[in-house]
Image (cartoon, rainbow, N blue to C red):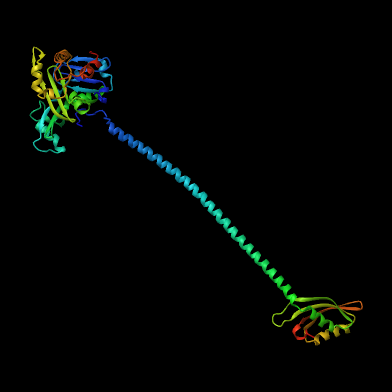
Amino acid sequence: MLKTRILKNPLWVQTESHLYGTHSGGWSHQLESPGTLPQFGELIEKLPASAWESSKAALFLPEIACFPLKVEMAHKVGLRERENYIKWNLKKRLPFPSEDALIRYLPLGDSSTWLVFSLPGSWVEEAHAFFKQKGIQLGYIGTISGLFLERLKVKSSRILLAYRHFYTFIQREAGRLTHFSLRRFPEEGGQILFPEFFPQDFPEGGNADPLQVISFCSDRNVEWSMFRDQDVSSPWKLMEAEENLARFLVTLAGRA
Amino acid sequence: MADLNFSPKPFVRRDPVQTLVVLAHVLLLVAFLGSAYYLYTLHVEQREQLNVVDQLKDRRQSLQDDFERVSFDLQDLDLRTYDREIRFYAQIQQELQIPWVTLMDVLADQLPDGVRIQFFSSGGSISSSGGEAAMQILAEARSKKDQLTFLEALRNHEAFHNILLLSETYEGPTLLFETAFTFEPATGGGR
């Protein structure tokens, strides 16, 4: 499942509220401004020294930080014009100037719809330059879902990346991305309303492949475990512990 | 495969297929270089063998030339020996054709009492044109008169021609002389 060389390097993993590092010993840091892109210059003094000791690193941002958007192609657009067309389409949909946007995209379903991830180019350059100044090659900047879509061989065709308040759902058929959604959990009293949550977003129900859930919020692991224990007959099959990337990352980070 | 990496300097991506292709290319290159080196060694070895073959050819040609020369010399030597034998046997044959009995009888009739023949030899053959035989004799005469009588008798006989007195030597009371003549058996040899 994790057959990629990227994960052999120290990982910086950002969730909604925390920044985790899988360096030797592991570390975590609670972000002061949740939901925003990290400003590494401000974190030098707050992070342990081990965070700056590696020569290579990979940075995983939460999907919500990369503004995943769907772009409909009204007509067939050539490869050379595609990026400009997408940026033009995103002009009023991004919270920052689309001219500054770095975009990465892949087809969603048929080729008429594209899923686009965007980051401010100035922030990427700044982050890369900062790490370079520290002697670290930041060789991967992306998302966990991007890593799954791009490199990881996953058995299941349905994956749910569960953060604290929102989740990312990925569905693939024959290796092609057919569904991508980013939503908030239906919650009540801080607890996920599973009965509302599942039928709402996954109408395929029992006819679908087992759903693999990767939780990036350790506080939610109890809820997910309870759900698994209580709903034995459920068609939804949670990932086993050893396959849980979140647990894997947390273990590496020394937070298990 | 989509590229969803935002890093300006991404990690080098080592695709297994690409790695295999590169490895295959490296192996092919190594195999090609090995084959090229093997062909080069074969070429060098072939060139050396060709040189050896050329040397053997030259040696064979030289030996063949020597053989032909020796064969020619042997053939020439054989021919010369053969010619000499032919001439020798022809001479014997010619000599055998001289009618010695007739010649002796006719010559005896011409000898006076004071002359006797000591040595008699033929010139080797009878001429093909006239059937004459060149003869030479060494004789001893008691006196000059006897010598002249003998020579005169030869001159007067129709079977003897070209009578020449080659030499004469006085030894005490006797006179040794050599004379040459040709003998024609057909004219007077029959007596």
Taking A29 as reference, is B66 left or right? right
Q: Quadrant of the C terminus of chain B?
A: bottom right
Q: Is residue A46 visible?
A: no
Q: Position of residue A155 (x, y in %)?
A: 21, 25
User: What residue is at 8 percent from the left and 36 percent from the top?
Assistant: A74
Q: Nearer the viewer, residue A143 or A107?
A: A107
Q: Position of residue B119 (x, y in %)?
A: 83, 75
Q: Is residue A167 visible?
A: yes
User: What residue is at 54 percent from the left and 54 percent from the top?
Assistant: B58
Vertically, is A86 above or below A209?
Answer: below
Q: Farthest residue to the right: give it.
A: B173
Vertically, is A40 above or below B79?
Answer: above
Report which quarter residue B97 is drawn in. Answer: bottom right
Q: Position of residue B69 (x, y in %)?
A: 60, 61
Report which quarter residue B19 is drawn in. Answer: top left
Taking B154 as reference, is A90 left or right? left
